[in-house]
Image (tube, coloured by chain):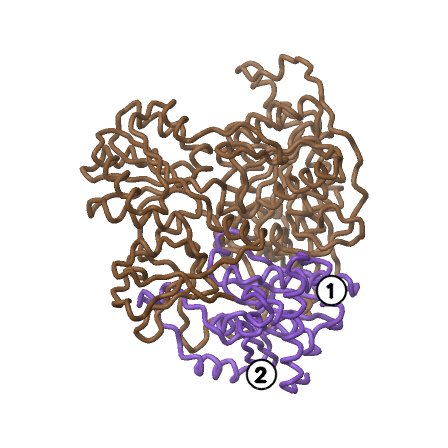
Amino acid sequence: MNKTSIVFAGVGGQGILTAANILGKAALEANKKALIAEVHGMAQRGGAVECIINIGDVYSALICNDSADVLVSLEPVEALRQLSKIKKDRLVITDINPVIPPSVSLGIDTYPDLEDVFKEIQEKCRLIKIDALGLAIQSGARIAKNMVLLGALADTGLLPFLPQLLLKTIQKNLPSRYMAISEKAFDSGRVFLKNNNYVE
Amino acid sequence: MDVLAKKSPALLLGNQAITRGALEAGIDVVTTYPGTPASEIADSFSAVAKYLKSQKKDPGFYFQYSVNEKVAVEFAAAASICGLRSLTCMKHVGLNVASDAFLTYMYVGCKAGHIIVTADDPSCHSSQNEQDNRIYSKLAHAPMFEPSDPQEAKDMALEGFTLSEKLKIPLLLRTTTRVSHVRGPVTLNPLKKKKTTKGIFRKNPLLVTVPAVARQLHSVLLEKMDEAAAISEKIPFNYIINHGGTKGIITSGPSYGYVRDVINELHLECKILKLGMTHPLPKKLCKDFLKSCDEVIIVEELEPFIEEQIRAIAYDEDVKIYGKGAGHFSRLYEYTPDIVAHSISEIFHLKHKTSSDSPKVKLPARPPVLCPGCPHRATYYAVKQVVPKDTIFPTDIGCYTLGNAPPLKIADYLLCMGSNVGTACGFSYATEQKVVSFMGDSTFFHSSLPGIVNAVHHNNDCVITVLDNRTTAMTGHQPHPGTSKSGMGENIRMLKIEDVAKGLGIQHIEVVNPTNIEETKKAFIRSLRYKGPSVVVSRAPCILLIVSNKRKHGKNIIPYTINQHKCTQCKICINKFGCPAFFLEGNQVKIDKTLCTSCGVCQQICPSNAIEKEGNHE
């Protein structure tokens, strides 16, 4: 079976659906089947959100645990929350900037030490930590974090299409008034990956 | 626009695929009340209508956001009997609201095809229950399609009109969250080019369901269902995939996809009976399938709807049946490939092992919350400042239900749309406690009006709050009768909530802007003093609308920040107000710049004036 499963994780409102939609459209452009499990409605209001993008020979949008090929997260704790989805020794790419849930501020829950979070991820997978927020701000908007991570994902060699196709899909589908920012953010993610000498 | 795509296949959400199917069928009339996971069906029609009108083109159909699901079904039933193809879409609990019309509508029947879409929500992702609406198809005698993916959703929407016209009864198209909210490739047929047309109503005594007519129509309906059962035997949506062997699996809906992926992974040799038309079931097809197997597993989410019928069909067959009845599958929550793999491998003695969901490091819970800058939070904060301690807060269905989370904890009782008022009346009679109920603006019109009449008529002492954020926010910002745009983008008459309340006989009415905390507190103090039912309309637009409007006009959203010299760490902003943009870094209170929407309400609640607008922004 020829199948690539990507899990996108984060907090409702961070642009996960946009990133997933871009990946799905790029897959279709590359003449591949894609099924995407999305989250709409109440869960989008600041809750933990995950979106699964399956490309290739698939019948269902959801996946078994230990079967995703790559996990991309817009928030470090949310990466760990979805770790069960990914195959052992595969790749996790996560932003390093926490979004503190209200339950933590209220003292009901604690936000774990990031070192512990990264350590547990590394026990199962390879980990790329990226200051996506910083790169997004440099690109012109905090909200462009999703594009930074798409850029980083594009050059891992894990996608069944080239980074250039992903960029083209972004240009075709995102609002033109943010295009300069989106392109810059996407590129900064790609550059980050290259500078860190990551090769799959 | 994805729904109007010319290039096939297009990547469509299951809900968009239903819209596409109806457009390919030449739809005339669409009605809805928004609700997750159904909303994007109607929103896509709305977007198409607005887009084509902006291009000076005739959309070819009429679309409306109706006041509630019952009216939506009634409106479309009338259109259908006049010869106009109709579609009405709603979430599963919406069909409860529409059920009074729906059940007798099956007797009366339709003329042009009418598809009623019910989008069920196993696991209650965005709902107050996880009822299985397939049971409605039996209760009402409605033929039913159950798609498994976006492609089937489109095909079934297209085919549904023909079947409905053939049988002259509406058809139930039942999706779940994992069909409605799955995006996948959809092979397109050309859109049917047509002009908006009117039908004609021909009088017929059989359209008036007095008892003598109803008795006749019931038997006609049962005959139609016999015809539907014959169709179900032949329809291509019911089919067998034969990979050999004597093991069988019968499945429907998204479970079919899980079964396909799981048997590939387990390398299981078996046959699959895939059911797309699940009411009436193709009994002969099922029986033949059962005869060809020694063991059969039934995989369907929620109630054993197919299973119980299969067990009846298999009564004198020598075949072992596994499913919910044998305890291998749950009636609870949506399925996942892991759940399906686990049960199939247990039944057939195969190996399937995956790691557990929970990591070793304890993670903080992250449930959905009221957005930063949400005006509901301001209302709730003000109310909590002025009410007696044991005040009861009946709530309702919408974003504001999220007020149940700490620190606000301002939701005490909830049943369904509109239940806030009816229960407020009951609590005011049943206790000596004060009662302050909450509902949204769309909910006010949807099903709260009879409750208010009841409160006035019986003079129940309660404060009825309408949180008017100028939109139906939770489901994706649809208009409602309290706003002035139609689903087709036209200017239409806006009903003012305070005028409606007055018309219903409410004598104490307050209209207040909740972003002014002091004024809001005063309004509630006055309403609490009033003996009898009072209405407070707490009106400020949804912050998401304000933010997107600012972005559209290129305006910066300048976040607030804490002046650490002034902050005394009293933490009222966190422990009482609870805006998610606030967080603690060590002992310092900070504001997350990405989350802050610049609403400024927190400035009013800080006793040390420590919250300031950021000077140098991005």
- Residue at 74% of width from left, 62% of height from top? A33
- Residue at 66% of width from left, 40% of height from top? B45
From the image, state the color of chain B. brown
Amino acid type for the residue under numbered disc 1: Ala
Q: Quadrant of residue B136?
A: top right
Residue at the disc numbered 2: A126
Q: Mark 2 or mark 1, which is nearer the start of the sequence?
A: 1
**Residue B582 falls left or right of residue A136:** left
Q: Position of residue A46 (x, y in %)?
A: 46, 59
Q: Using the image, determine if residue B574 lies above or below residue B541.
A: below
Extreme-left residue of the structure: B432
- Crowd rating for badge 1 (residues with CA inside 10 Å; few <14, some 14–19, many 20+): many
Extreme-bottom residue of the structure: A197
- From the viewer's side, name the closer residue of B38 and A175: A175
Q: Are marks 1 and 2 on the same chain?
A: yes
Q: Using the image, determine if residue B124 lies above or below residue A168.
A: above
Residue B213 can be seen, yes or no: yes
- Crowd rating for badge 2 (residues with CA inside 10 Å; few <14, some 14–19, many 20+): some
Q: Position of residue B115 (x, y in %)?
A: 65, 35
Residue at the disc numbered 1: A27
From the image, state the color of chain A. purple
- Residue B448 — which label? none
